[in-house]
Image (cartoon, helix red, strand yellow):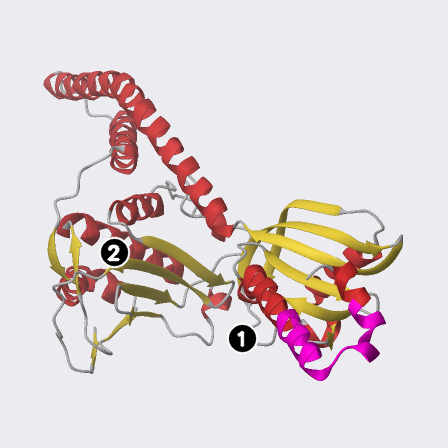
Amino acid sequence: MKSGFLQKLLDRTDKIDKEQIVDYMIEIAEERDMLFHLFDSMIEGMVVIDEDTTVIYINRSARTVLDLGDGPSIPDLPLEKFLFYPSLVSLFREGMESRESIHFDNYTLNISGEKKFLQINFIPLTKSESRFGTMLLFLDQTHQKEQEKRLRDAEKLAALTTLSAGVSHEIRNPLNALSIHLQLLTRHLKKKGVEDDEIADVLTIFSNEISRLNNVIESFLAAARPSTPQFTLVNLYNLITEILNLMEPEFLQNNIFVSLHEEGNWPLVRADHNQLKQAFINVLRNAIEAISTQSEDEAAHKSKEVIIHQIRSETEVTIAFEDTGKGMPPEDIPHIFEPYFTSKPKGTGLGLMVVNRIVREHEGTVSATSQEGIGTQISISLPVAAESPKLLEQGTQST
């Protein structure tokens, strides 16, 4: 119904019978419902605020992105009572105060503990050169940003792989030559009957440093070299208990208590047994280092503990490895899966990169949360195999 026609209708209401008014009202309600349906079908979030800072309309996409739950399309609530995020309220007020349209191409917001990337447009609403409100249109680009990051990481890994092949070859050849000549020199000195502790110490240092460089190259190649997983059905509970038995001496040596929670039924996953084993071992060795390298002050009033548990859904299982180590500052967390990023004095920065690569090859995800002085949790999520039976009853096993 056109607004001009509606105005004419209002001008002659005294000449229209009741049935006609009802028909017109039904038509108006149908048009209103159609508009609301169209707005709710939009990918973009939409919020409309009047001049009195009252939220007079919000569509379904906006409620979803802003984590506002279900509710009416016309809240008719003051801005501060409708939104629980001070940063959002400040952002909305900034848009409402501007007489021109405002565009934010990449605005970051923390909503319910999750970082979201939004493209935002504030549009002044005017009629006859008089402003009656502000419309906010925004598009959630978080998934797109995550995809772009995965693509950049894949490109970095591809470049690292190409580089590793050439660099390792160029370094290994002279290292092998040095190692061979060092052995020949050692034998020659023994034949000559030369016994000098200082010379022996120097030769030992040479030998150790050559071995260390070889180990660095092996770690580099293991992190960068692409490998095709050999997928089989893997019992996660059996795999983790196998790893805990293997690493038991390391935990005992560092006086670390390990608890494996068996809540629920542990599923099967399609995985390369050896690669997934390597990923879990890398995470647990990181936990051991985080706990054992704490200062006395940091370790005071804290137990030395690693807790392993699962979070299960119909399609995914998450294995959480939680330690009571020194934790990490917030600015380090986004970088811990990058190559050569490490806060350890003798770390290579490749262990968690290997974990990230293996998990991605298994179509999974890995994430981290941490608090300085409290500890760190590394979570590995993997798709559940369709063949997963109900495996275990509830219980707890400790090492």
Q: What amino acid type is highlighted by mark number 2?
A: Phe
Specify whether 144 is left or right of 194: right
Q: Are marks 2 and 1 in contact (CB under 8 Å)?
A: no
Return the residue nearer the eye: 291 or 55: 55
Image x and y of residue 272, in percent: 15, 49
Query: Circle 2 — which element?
Result: helix
The residue singled out by tag 2 in the image is 280
Give the secondary structure at mark 1. loop
Q: Nearer the viewer, residue 102 or 221?
A: 102
- Residue 77 spot, x, y in % from top left: 72, 77
Q: Quadrant of the C terminus?
A: bottom left
- Verify whether residue 40 appears in magenta: no
Q: Is residue 23 above or below residue 169?
A: below
Spot occupied by residue 32 in the image (x, y as percentages of width and height): 63, 68
Tell me the tag on residue 70: 1
- Name the side, left or right, on which 272 lies relative to 51: left
Position in image of residue 236 (x %, y %): 17, 63
Residue range (magenta): 9-28
Q: Nearer the viewer, residue 189 or 227?
A: 227
Q: Main secondary structure of the magenta part?
A: helix
Quarter residue 303 falls in: bottom left
Q: Amino acid at mark 1?
A: Asp
Is residue 67 in view from this perspective? yes
Q: How many marks?
A: 2
Q: Residue at x 73, y 52 (%)?
A: 122
Q: Residue at x 72, y 70 (%)?
A: 55
Q: Nearer the viewer, residue 29 or 233?
A: 29
